[in-house]
Image (cartoon, helix red, strand yellow):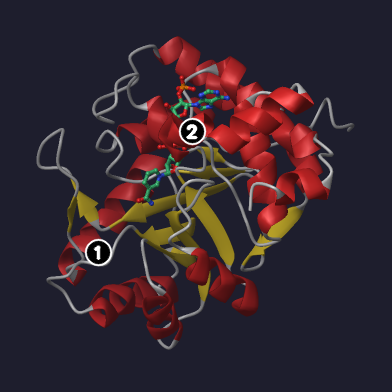
Amino acid sequence: MNEHGNPAAAAGALHLGDLIVRRMGFGAMRVTTDGSDIWGPPADPRTAKLLLHRALELGINFFDTADSYGPHASESFIAETLYPYPEGLVIGTKGGVVRPSRRRWDPDGRPEHLRRALDGSLKRLRLERVDLYQLHAPDPQVPFADSVGVLAEAQRAGKIRHLGLSNVSVTQLEAARRIAPIASVQNQYNLENRKSEDVLKACERLGVAFIPWYPLGDGAALRSRGLKGLARRLGLPPAQVALAWLLARSPVMLPIPGTASIAHLEENTAAATLRIPPEDLAALN
Ligand SMILES: NC(=O)c1ccc[n+]([C@@H]2O[C@H](COP(=O)([O-])OP(=O)(O)OC[C@H]3O[C@@H](n4cnc5c(N)ncnc54)[C@H](OP(=O)(O)O)[C@@H]3O)[C@@H](O)[C@H]2O)c1
């Protein structure tokens, strides 16, 4: 298939453990609602279904979700729309954050919660084993080793294929690796926020996939002056240049841009096909 039929393939691929995924994924957080609270089922289910199918058509084979998106709505909607899943689709979900109300995202890394959360995700996603299960965030009230430990136990029991972490430091990544193999880290990272540069470098060194959340800075990175100037000069949409910059930044980078718009999904995925001169992208460094 050529780049027009399968643009995500142009991003190349990386390993998530023994799985191989294209380096342009899909963030499925925004299929829940059109609003910013990530609460409730899709406002426009018809478009949301078309969006998920279009992501597959574009060659995307990694979808990122979490039990807290909706809550539960993103996972349920993915299963309702795509089950039985096409060969090669890798779904990564997360547990360890709860939503007592639409504005709250509270960490809950207690082993008893994580056991229940994983079982809930498996049920909603209609899976016996999830390909990638990520600890959504360390819980300051719970020893980190206890949260990772219970997920390692679930992996040994066959419920998790690969373990990932999210919102962690290099020290936490190293601590987790002493308990179980870690396939990925998902931290905030974009043109405007590079606080996790050290974690990205550690992932590169260790051969761990780095999944930048807010790859477009929730839209804010698109307003950066340098980006807007370069995009204008190249005649490209800023989102495409921002994603091309991420892809060029590291071979372990696996962006998961989120959108509720099919036009934006197409635009974002096409970023993988761009051949922007490295010196132009380096000017954004
Ligand atoms: N691990 C964590 O703690 C964590 C936290 C947040 C997010 N995530 C994950 O990261 C994924 C991506 O994050 P995100 O969706 O919050 O942020 P994002 O990808 O940085 O940005 C999404 C925002 O940008 C807009 N957008 C998307 N494509 C665009 C384009 N081509 N042109 C202009 N605007 C565009 C979207 O609006 P439209 O809908 O109008 O396109 C939306 O408002 C999520 O889906 C989720 O899977 C993880």
In the image, residue 226 sits, relative to residue 42, either above or below, namely: below
Q: Is mark 2 within 8 Å of ligand 1?
A: yes
In the image, residue 10 sits, relative to residue 3, either above or below, namely: below
Furthest residue toward right: 2
Quadrant of image for the N terminus: top right
Task: Answer whether residue 43 is visible to the viewer in this image.
Answer: yes
> Image check: 95 left or right of 77?
left
Question: To which quarter of the image does residue 187 belong?
Answer: bottom left
Q: Residues within 10 Å of mark 2 (few under 14, many from 20)?
A: many
For the residue marked with disc 1, what is the amino acid?
Arg
Q: Nearer the viewer, mark 2 or mark 1?
A: 2
> Image check: 256 left or right of 187?
right
Percent across and percent down for residue 101 are 10, 36
Label 2, on which residue? 258
Question: To which quarter of the image does residue 178 belong?
Answer: bottom left
Q: Nearer the viewer, residue 224 or 99?
A: 224
Name the element at disc 2: loop
> Image check: 268 left or right of 165?
right
Q: Residue at x 29, y 75 (%)?
A: 150
Percent across and percent down for residue 219 are 45, 30
Q: Which circle marks residue 115 in the picture?
A: 1
> Image check: 38 left or right of 107?
right
For the residue marked with disc 2, what is the amino acid?
Gly
Q: Which circle marks residue 140 in the picture?
A: none
Task: Answer whether residue 22 is visible to the viewer in this image.
Answer: no
Percent across and percent down for residue 36 are 29, 26
